Every structure is written in C-alpha cells, then in structure tokens.
Amino acid sequence: VRGVTPLLLWREHRGLTQRDLAARIGVKPGYLSEVERGLKRGSLPLLTRAAAVLEVTVEELMAGSGPAAFRDLPPHLRP
C-alpha cells in the first residue's frame, strides 16, 4: 500500500505519536514522517533504534510497502 509502511503501522499500534517516537530515537518528527511515508529510507541505526522502541525486529520494519511487508502484522493492522 503506497504511503503506508510497517514503521507507521507499528508506531500507531504501540500508541506513540510521531513526536514521541522521534524523540525516543533521536530524529526530528518531520524526518520520521518522511521515512514512515516511504519518501526517505531510514538508516540501519535509525531502524534499529525504532525497532527496539516498538518491540519488533528490524526486518519487520524493513519489509517495504508491498503486500508481503504486512504479512507479519497483526490482522487488525493490515491495510
């Protein structure tokens, strides 16, 4: 689904705002927004920090935005 990434869905599932997650992983909310929408690729260090906060694996966050990317998401989070 274009414009929807596992990072965005997991953040929302965990009940965090962009501002909250950005502060916890050390980036600006605007940059996080671009990564979440697939406009920019997050670096491995950024995704590693985000995965730790969201309690998922980096692989789950790097799955991309195609249908297979959402296979491991809980059913209620799948677009």
Image (cartoon, rainbow, N blue to C red):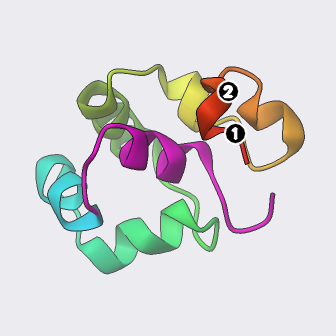
Quarter of the image for residue 15 reads top left
Task: Using the image as rendered, state which of residue 11 and residue 38 is in the foreground.
Answer: 11
Horizontally, is 9 left or right of 66 in the view? left
* Region rendered in magenta: 1-17
57 w.r.t. 62: above or below = above
Q: Is residue 9 magenta?
A: yes
Residue type indicated by callout 2: Pro
Label 1: state its secondary structure: loop
Quarter of the image for residue 74 reads top right
Q: Give the position of the N terminus as an image quadrant.
A: bottom right
75 w.r.t. 77: above or below = above
Q: Are marks 1 and 2 in contact (CB under 8 Å)?
A: yes
Instruction: Identify the residue at image location x=19%, y=67%.
Output: 19
Classify mark 2: residues with Cα within 10 Å, few (<14), some (14-19) or many (20+): few
Horizontally, is 55 left or right of 28 in the view? right
Q: How many marks?
A: 2
Instruction: Identify the residue at image location x=37%, y=30%.
Output: 51
Task: Using the image as rendered, state which of residue 14 and residue 46 is in the foreground.
Answer: 14
Label 2: state its secondary structure: helix
Instruction: Identify the residue at image location x=41%, y=39%.
Output: 13
Horizontally, is 9 left or right of 68 in the view? left
Q: Is residue 56 magenta?
A: no
